[in-house]
Image (cartoon, rainbow, N blue to C red):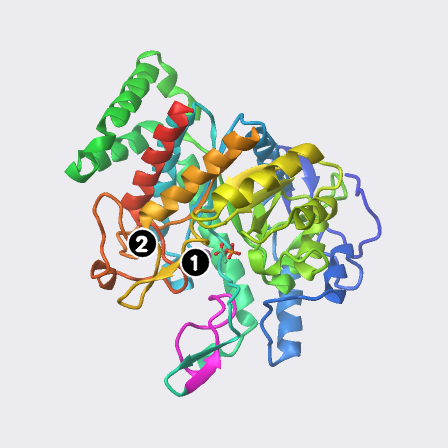
């Protein structure tokens, strides 16, 4: 075995690259790794840990842990995202705003995975394209916050920053950032990925089973308007079975990739490893990592860290993004214009997307370096209900999705996919949809700790509506 780079101390074999005898080299020490250059940059939205020695020992422990994802899988996803940038595949990203440790259970995860697989079947039919399935899952445990402090009554405490940082409970002890939570994050991500691999390889993702679940959805009179599309899909599945395709392994297993916001720089850099086959650094905490709207400063630490890794990466773009901001991000994150490397996830707001997005699309098309364009129709459309809940309206979310397709049609560019916050549970967090969830209903099952999520039914309804739209395109 050859080691592609020799400047890293303490090499040893510990992580297989599937399909190849090549191995990841161990994590580099802090001083030697080039991607640690982020430490000299401005790092926004980082927890302030009271005990820096405790943090250092956690990071040393993390550097000893095996990678969670493998370079070969990450490369496959980059290739798939390249196809999406050309209009030859469609991206579906979905999952919680913030995963929690207490909901990393088999039941919650199963329902979430089931929801994503059901949506993917509908979208595959609607788009007549392969659907790239990505979860906001197995690592989405840290949140940027608009305020460092939260006040309730006359008590002010540090904000909840996700289970990877502190606890939601509103007491002084719970809100102190605790670095040992980074190890809990690692272990929850590992067990979640293990379950994903089992579900997606072990028969649970079988097209016929997923299709059977979708039949259950359209049997509900509230969703009768989707019956004819469901019937078309049914005939297509029957055809595949009759033609003998259904016995093929492709019917039984799928790829479901993991993604999260690469927010906590200490964790993300401790999980970065050199692929010994190529000598390139990979962030092994997830297949796809994105930079949030609040931390995408081109000279800041998050961009610096992700500029160093080979993973496909995303950057959220809000409505105030200028053409110059965008060009500088491309210069820094994808200077050579490699297809599949960079995804822009736009989150403009339904009322802004139709005028804010086309100029960016046109400028990028003129630039010529490829980008995969994905819509996040959630984060520009958050409102507060009269009953005091942070919520969103299903119809407004769908309006942003429609605006996204219209903007691409106007600019002559490729709408590559959708990125949504959802759960497989029957929560009541987002208003509207065919079941007309109203402000009173928000009280029933409002469970999210951060942003409101589409419930199982609303997620499927979105998939049917997007599929109808794609079919007409
Ligand atoms: C998120 O995706 O949960 C998020 C915080 O998004 P944004 O960075 O776009 O606000
Ligand atoms: Co969110």
Could you tell me which residue is drawn at 74 percent across and 57 percent down? 28
Q: Is residue 265 left or right of residue 414?
A: right
Q: Which residue is mark 2?
A: 430
Location of ligand 2 given as a quarter of the image = bottom left
Outermost residue to the front: 355
The quadrant of the rendering that contains the C terminus is top left
By secondary structure, the bulk of the magenta-drawn segment is best described as loop
CA neighbours of label 1 inside 10 A, class few (<14), some (14 to 19), many (20+): many
- Identify which residue, 348 or 110, lies in the foreground: 348
Could you tell me which residue is drawn at 66 percent across and 78 percent down? 53
Q: Which residue is mark 1?
A: 99
Give the answer, above or below, for where 15 lies relative to 77.
Answer: below
State the separation of the CA atoms marked 2 and 1: 17 Å
| Residue 107 image point, x, y percent | 32, 51
Q: Is residue 434 left or right of residue 346?
A: left
Q: Is residue 338 visible from the viewing direction of this image? A: no
Pointer 2 residue Cβ closer than 8 Å to ligand 2: no
Q: Quadrant of residue 38?
A: bottom right
Q: Is residue 329 magenta?
A: no
- Identify which residue, 388 or 230, lies in the foreground: 388
CA neighbours of label 2 inside 10 A, class few (<14), some (14 to 19), many (20+): many
| Residue 370 image point, x, y percent | 65, 34
Pointer 1 residue Cβ closer than 8 Å to ligand 1: no
**Magenta stretch in the rendered image:** 155-172
The quadrant of the rendering that contains the N terminus is top right
Q: Is residue 158 magenta?
A: yes
Give the answer, above or below, for where 299 lies relative to 109.
Answer: below
Outermost residue to the bottom: 154
User: Does label 2 or label 1 sit earlier along the sequence?
Assistant: 1
Q: Quadrant of residue 10?
A: bottom right
């Amino acid at each position: 075995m050859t080691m592609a780079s020799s400047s890293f101390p303490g090499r040893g074999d510990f992580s297989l690259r599937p399909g190849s005898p090549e191995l990841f080299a161990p994590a580099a020490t802090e001083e030697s790794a080039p991607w640690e250059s982020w430490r000299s940059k401005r790092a926004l939205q980082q927890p302030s840990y009271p005990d820096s020695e405790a943090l250092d020992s956690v990071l040393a422990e993390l550097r000893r842990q095996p990678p969670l994802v493998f370079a070969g899988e990450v490369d496959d996803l980059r290739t798939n995202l390249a196809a999406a940038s050309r209009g030859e595949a469609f991206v579906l990203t979905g999952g919680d705003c913030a995963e929690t440790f207490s909901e990393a259970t088999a039941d919650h995860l199963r329902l979430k995975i089931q929801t994503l697989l059901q949506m993917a079947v509908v979208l595959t039919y609607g788009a007549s394209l392969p659907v790239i399935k990505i979860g906001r899952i197995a690592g989405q445990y840290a949140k940027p916050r608009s305020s460092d402090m939260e006040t309730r009554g006359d008590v002010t405490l540090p904000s909840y920053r996700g289970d990877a940082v502190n606890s939601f409970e509103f007491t002084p002890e719970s809100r102190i950032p605790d670095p040992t939570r980074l190890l809990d994050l690692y272990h929850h991500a590992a067990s979640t990925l293990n379950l994903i691999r089992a579900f997606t390889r072990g028969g649970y993702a079988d097209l016929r089973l997923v299709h059977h679940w979708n039949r259950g959805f359209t049997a509900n009179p509230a969703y009768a308007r989707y019956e004819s599309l469901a019937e078309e899909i049914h005939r297509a599945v029957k055809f595949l079975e009759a033609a003998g395709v259904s016995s093929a392994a492709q019917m039984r297993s799928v790829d479901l990739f993991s993604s999260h916001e690469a927010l906590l720089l200490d964790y993300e850099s401790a999980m970065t490893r050199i692929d010994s086959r190529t000598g390139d650094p990979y962030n092994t905490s997830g297949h796809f990592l994105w930079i949030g709207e609040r931390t995408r400063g081109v000279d800041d630490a998050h961009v610096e860290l992700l500029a160093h890794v080979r993973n496909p990466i995303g950057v959220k773009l809000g409505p105030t993004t200028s053409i110059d901001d965008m060009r500088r991000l491309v210069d820094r994150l994808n200077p050579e214009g490699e297809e599949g490397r960079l995804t822009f996830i736009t989150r403009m707001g339904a009322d802004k997307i139709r005028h804010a997005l086309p100029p960016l699309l046109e400028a990028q098309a003129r630039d010529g370096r490829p980008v995969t364009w994905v819509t996040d129709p959630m984060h520009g459309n958050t409102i507060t209900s009269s009953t005091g809940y942070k919520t969103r309206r299903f119809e407004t979310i769908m309006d942003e999705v429609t605006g996204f397709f219209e903007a691409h049609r106007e600019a002559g560019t490729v709408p590559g996919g959708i990125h949504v916050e959802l759960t497989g549970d029957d929560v009541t967090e987002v208003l509207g949809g065919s079941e007309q969830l109203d402000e009173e209903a928000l009280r029933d099952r409002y469970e999210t700790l951060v942003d409101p999520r589409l419930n199982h039914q609303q997620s499927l309804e979105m998939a049917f509506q997007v599929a109808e739209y794609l079919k007409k395109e």
